[in-house]
Structure formats: structure tokens, C-alpha cells
Image: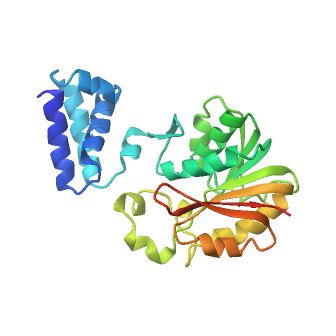
Amino acid sequence: MTIQTALRQGQQLLEKADVSAPRLNAEVLLAHAVGCERSWLFTHSNEELREVWWIHYGRYLHERMQGKPTQHITGVQEFYGREFRVTPDVLIPRPETEHLIEAALMLGARKIVDIGTGSGAIAITLALETGAQVVGTDISLAALRVAAADTHSSRVEWLACDLGSALAGDYFDLVVSNPPYIAAGDKSTLQREVRDYEPAVALYGGDDGLEVYRRLVPEAERLLRPGGWLVMELGHTSGEAVSGMLGAWRNVEIRKDLANLPRVILAQRP
């Protein structure tokens, strides 16, 4: 059994299980089994697969075919050029959330709070990219343990609290958040990888998906200095409703992602 053959067979098994991007998943899982970069597989495609590699690879393929996310098998997900630790206790960082990072970096903030930090990907990235003082909050102690386990040598302060309730007001230049925005009734429409494996507290925003936004907007107004900025990720149908919550705020702007869907909203505290 060569590496090339193992990849082909893994791809076929994942295709039959209706796993999206089956070839990519097969490559990532085999690289994890071997303990190498994906590029090594291509330069050693005719090398015989060692027994221990095959044992691990077979187990990973079985787990993926049952719906377990690849990131939970490998334990990592890349975000903004860095690998972040992920477990079932945190939302897997998405490429779309990098639009939030790009928006935040343009604002020149020196004191930042990431509400609902989860894996810490947003907080750690902003700390490393800006050198700002960053605080990450989450209601889940389990999520904070994941975030604090590997900070990439950044200096982020982690706080367990509901939204920003443990923080003083009129202090921050920037509040960022990727809040839960899926309506509870939409649970059945989600991919099984999301519905069955990612934490509900990070996914569902009440009956209409807007519950956390309703609480977060006034909380951000309390936390921000006058003229400070709020930057939040949006669900693809929530832009108009969230914008309506920012009636007194200035410079409200919705930015779209590469799929031309509303992805990030910015607003400045009056």
C-alpha cells in the first residue's frame, strides 16, 4: 500500500460517506497519521505506508465518515496564518471570520475586548497583529482553558463572565465579537459536523438568532470609550436587524464576504 494508493482509497471512502472536499480531508488525515506536512505526501507518493500509519489513518477515516470534524481529529485549525487548538468545547475558527480581523486592524485600537472568545483565535490574532492590550471573555470555562493552552506567546487576559460583565465601562477602544447567530429552529438544517459536534452555546442565538446581539450592543456601548468601535460578525440574514439595533451609533457599515454575503458590521459609539 503506497501513500498515493492510500490517498485514493481514503478519498473514495469519504466520497461515499458524502463528506465534502474528500480529497483534501484524506490528505489532511493521512498527514496527521504520518506526522508530516501535506506537501511531504506528494513528494513521497510511492513510499510504502507503514503499518502504524495505516492503523491511525484507518481510524481517522472512520471517525470522519461518522461525521466527526477533521479539526477535532487533528486538534487544530488554521486561522490568519496560525494554527489554533480546537476541541468540542469551542467553535472551529472559520475563514469568513478573517473578515472581522481585517476590519478590526484598520481601526488602530490599543485596548480591545473579544466577547465570546471561544478558541481565542480572534483575541490572540489581534494581540499579535497590533500589539494592543487584549482581553478575551467567555461564559464557558472549558473554552477559556482551550484558548489559554496555546496563546502563541501573545499576552491576552482571559476572563470568565457573561459578555463583558466582569469589565469596567468606558475603557476599551474596540469591542469585537463573533456571537452565536443561528436561530434555534434552524438546527436541523445544519451540517452534521456542526450540529452534532460543536458547542450549542457558541451556535444558537435564541429563537430568531438575534438574542445575543440585543444584549451585546448595549453592553458594548457601556464598555467602549466615546468614539470607540464595535465590530461583530453577522449571520447571512441578520445584517438589517442588527443594523436596526444601532440607531444612535455613528458610521454604521456592513461589509460583505467573498460570497457577497453580509459578514461584518462596524459601528462607532457616539
Work out whether residue 120 can be spotted: no
> Number of labelled discs?
0
Residue 137 picture location, percent across and down: 69, 51
> In the image as oriented, which residue stretches furthest toward the left?
1
Q: Give the quarter of the figure containing the N terminus.
A: top left
**Residue under the image location 58 percent in, 43 percent down:** 121
In the rendered view, would you say 189 is above or below 146? below
Left or right of 209 on screen, residue 130: right
Give the image's coloring scheme. rainbow
| Quadrant hosting residue 123 | top right
**Residue under the image location 66 percent in, 35 percent down:** 129
Residue 29 picture location, percent across and down: 30, 38
Q: Give the quarter of the figure containing the C terminus.
A: bottom right
Residue 97 picture location, percent across and down: 55, 51
In the rendered view, would you say 48 is above or below 107? above
Left or right of 7 on screen, residue 200: right
Left or right of 259 on screen, residue 223: right
Left or right of 250 on screen, residue 6: left
In the rendered view, would you say 80 is above or below 166? above
**Residue under the image location 77 percent in, 55 percent down:** 229
Residue 219 picture location, percent across and down: 78, 64
Work out whether residue 163 can be spotted: yes
